[in-house]
Amino acid sequence: MLLIGGGAGAYSIASPDDAYQVAAYLWNNFLGGKSTSRPLGDAILDGIDFDLESGEGPYWGDLAKNLARYNSNRGSKKVYLTAAPQCPFPDACVGGALKTGVFDYVWVQFYNNPPCQYNQEIVTSFQDSWKQWISLIPAKKIFLGLPAAPDAAGSGFIPVGDLTS
């Protein structure tokens, strides 16, 4: 997987044509396409992870749809599209793209976001947010992204006993 975005820097897709060009670049340089300047040589990655954390944009969905169209070119090898949105619903950066229905896996980050992360005192905000994600996003699979230990994130850790009850 190649992750695009991240928590630092400014990035955007400026137009539908820009989305098409970026998809073609990603396909030819990292996925199953051909380019003389592939940064990873002959390595063919399995897909693209949308980790969009700074700024929203109306054309991320166009990028996702353009990447999904390459699946018909790969024979039996699929281009996976994944995302890791933050738990406030809808996610300000990748929310529109997720509505396209072309994402295979979505790992919703239920940590470092007090309005929707787990809180022993008020469990309903966490539960309500999770219900929105699983009922309104047409992804193949949606996962609960949680810190594995109290020190793994600034906030949002759920004790195992609370999670399983």
Image (cartoon, rainbow, N blue to C red):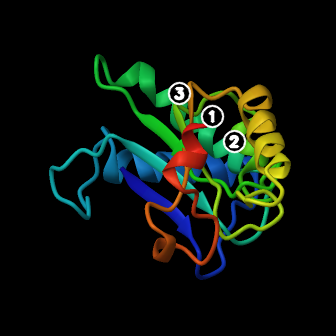
- The residue located at (58%, 57%) in the rendering is 158
For mark 1, does the 10 Å Cα neighbourhood hold few (<14), some (14 to 19), or many (20 or more) residues?
many
Q: Amino acid at mark 2?
A: Asp
Q: Residue furthest left?
A: 42
Q: Which three-letter amino acid code belongs to the residue tagged 3? A: Arg
- State the residue in front, 40 or 92: 92
Q: Secondary structure at mark 2?
A: helix
Q: Residues within 10 Å of mark 3 (few under 14, many from 20)?
A: few
Tell me residue 143's x, y (percent). Answer: 55, 39
Q: Is residue 107 visible?
A: no
Question: Residue flagged by tag 1: what amino acid is it?
Answer: Lys
Q: Gap in Å between the C-alphas at discs 2 and 1?
A: 5 Å
Quarter-of-image position of residue 33: top left
Q: Nearer the viewer, residue 83 or 64?
A: 83
3D distance between C-alphas at marks 2 and 3: 11 Å
On screen, residue 106 above or below 54? above
In the rendered image, which residue does mark 1 sit on?
A: 65
Q: Secondary structure at mark 3?
A: helix
The alpha-carbon separation of the residues under discs 3 and 1 comes to: 6 Å
Left or right of 103 on screen, residue 40:
left
Can you give x and y, in whole percent of width and height, for residue 11 in the image?
65, 72
State the image coordinates of residue 82 (x, y, percent, origin top left): 51, 43
Q: On the picture, is 137 further left or further right than 154?
A: right
Please report whichever mark, 2 or 3, sits nearer to the chain's N-terminal start. 2
From the image, tell me which residue sits under label 2: 62
- Residues marked 3 and 1 touching at CB (< 8 Å): yes
* Residue 103 placement, left or right of 49: right
> Which residue sits at x=61%, y=29%?
102
Task: Name the quadrant of the C terminus.
Answer: top right
Q: For mark 3, what is the residue?
A: 69
Q: Are marks 2 and 1 in contact (CB under 8 Å)?
A: yes
